[in-house]
Amino acid sequence: MSTSTPTRPRGGDDGVEGAGNANGNGSANGNGGASSGSGGGSGSGRGRANASATVAPKRRFRPRTVRQAILYVLLVVVSLIIVLPLLWVLITSFKTDGDVITNPYGFIPNPFSTEAYATLSSGQQPIFRWLLNSFLAATLQTILILVTASAAAYALARLEFRGKKIVFGLIIATLLVPPVIFLIPNYLIVQNLGWLDTIWAISIPGAASAFGVFFLRQFFIGLPMEIEEAARIDGAGDLRIFLQIIVPLSRPALATLAVLSFLANWNDFLWPIYVLLSPENLTLQPGLSQLQGAYSTHFSIVMAGAVIASVPVLILFALAQRQIVDSVASSGVKG
């Protein structure tokens, strides 16, 4: 018995294949169109992205930037206010008397002259003797202030004794008294000691500095106690701790106090006039006042003397600038 499998007609196969081909071609064409459409869309999208990327964003001024600009402008203005008078003194010292009178505010000497410096160095006025007197007096008083103020400040900052707060309060109270109040008492003391017209008269009376005691005491309080306690365990006494630990650690503060004390004595005008009697024993500040005549004043000579008086101070500040900055920076650091 034979079995037969049903067969489809050939036309039906052809129809199916034709439909398959048609569907295949149609879908291929459709996909191609879609891909071409998507390609065009992505290309135009990339074009717009590149175009937007080439446009630089607008920068807006921030409040912090504006504040910094205003601060810089103020700093420049303050710097000019400080520097311009010094520059005017320097330029005026190279002018002639006629140029000073006709063009007092000009910053270009016409003609340029060194006659004022030649006059000062000719020996008519002992300006270099005054310069030496001022340097010796300021240096001696500075050394005495550093010794007395540092010792007193260490006692008030670290040692315990009765009445310590009262003593410190009395020292601070002297800062509120005008210095001119001590003029007559100090003069009587100097006169009784026989120090009139000597360098001791302008060095010793100011050796006890209340400001120096206060300044160094506040600095000593900020130093860490652990270092001193370790030294005491090793057997060090108060004097050794002060000389070998406190003083080296306080070098920036001592340098700052030294500069301030030197400048105070260097610029002192009133006290030397009362206690220095001979012209050759004068210091620089009262000596420069003698360059002015009773009926006429040579301004170029006076300004040349002011320039000479400023040179040692500028050198001192240049040498101690780093220590002063370290002192200011360490004042806000707690041990």
Image: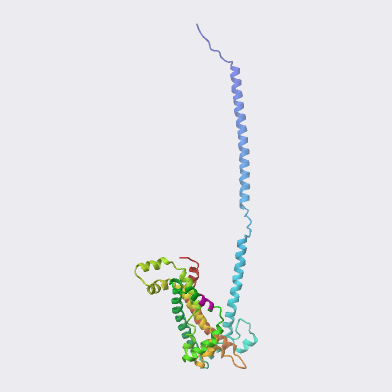
Does the magenta-highlighted stretch encompass residue 149?
no
Q: Quadrant of the C terminus?
A: bottom left
Q: Residue furthest front?
A: 162
Q: Is residue 257 in sight in this rendering?
A: yes
* Res. 180 image quadrant: bottom right
* Above/below status of 7 relative to 87: above
Colour mapping used in the image: rainbow
Q: Is residue 243 above or below residue 66?
A: below
Front residue of 293 and 122: 293
Residue 231: x %, y % from top left? 37, 68
**Toward the viewer: 50 or 142?**
142
Compared across the picture, whether 191 is left or right of 10 comes to: left
Report if residue 171 lies within the magenta region: yes
Indicate the position of residue 40 as horizontal and vertical percent values.
63, 41
Q: Residue at x 58, y 77 (%)?
A: 83
Q: Which residues are magenta?
A: 169-173
Q: Does residue 195 show up?
A: no
SS assignment for the magenta stretch, majority: helix
The percent position of residue 9, horizontal first and vertical second, equals 59, 15
In the image, what residue occupies the spot 48% across and 91% down? 192
